[in-house]
Image (spheres, rainbow, N blue to C red):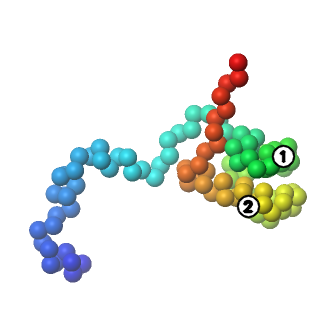
Amino acid sequence: MAWRQLTPAFNEISFFSSYPSSAFCNFSSKSTPYLVKVGIPEFLNGIGKGVENHVGKLENEIGDLHKLLVTRTLKLKKLGIPCKHRKLILQHSHKYRLGLWRPRAEPMKS
């Protein structure tokens, strides 16, 4: 507040109007929509490192990806998933919710 009083010439409107609006549109926290439907098998295959071995167990018990994304570690532990795999699933589900990580789309086999 005191800094603004010392520099009355600074105006936020003039600051933003001096830069084109296209400069700010690249910095968005929203992720672009994912065109390929992601389910539990695609999600776990994207993580790799042996986590994909638990696809059947998680599909039977949890059901869909959105429930997996909010599942806590205790539920995964009760399903018999080892600690390292639980840790990987929880880390990647957090990154996926934030839009920082996506499983790679597999190329179509011909």
Q: Which amino acid does label 1 sit on?
A: Asn
Q: Height in image: 88 above or below 6? A: above
- Image point 55% across, 50% down: which residue? 99
- Is residue 70 left or right of 8 when viewed as pictured? right
* Crowding at mark 2 (Cα within 10 Å: few <14, some 14-19, many 20+): some
For the residues bearing labels 2 and 1, Cβ distance under 8 angstroms: no
**Residue 24 x, y percent position in the rendering:** 32, 50
**Residue 107 x, y percent position in the rendering:** 65, 28
Disc number for residue 53: 1
**Residue 82 x, y percent position in the rendering:** 84, 60
Q: Height in image: 109 above or below 65? A: above
- Is residue 90 left or right of 22 when viewed as pictured? right
Give the SS element for disc 2. Answer: helix
In the image, farthest residue toward the bottom: 2
Q: What residue type is labelled 2?
A: Lys
- Image point 21% across, 62% down: which residue? 12
Residue 104 sits in which quadrant?
Answer: top right
Q: Height in image: 90 above or below 99? A: below
Whether residue 43 appears in this view of the structure is: no
Give the SS element for disc 1. Answer: helix
* Crowding at mark 1 (Cα within 10 Å: few <14, some 14-19, many 20+): some
Disc number for residue 87: 2
Residue 71 sits in which quadrant?
Answer: bottom right
- Is residue 39 left or right of 14 when viewed as pictured? right
- Image point 18% across, 52% down: which residue? 18
- Image point 57% across, 34% down: which residue? 35
Disc 2 and disc 1: Cα gap in Å?
15 Å
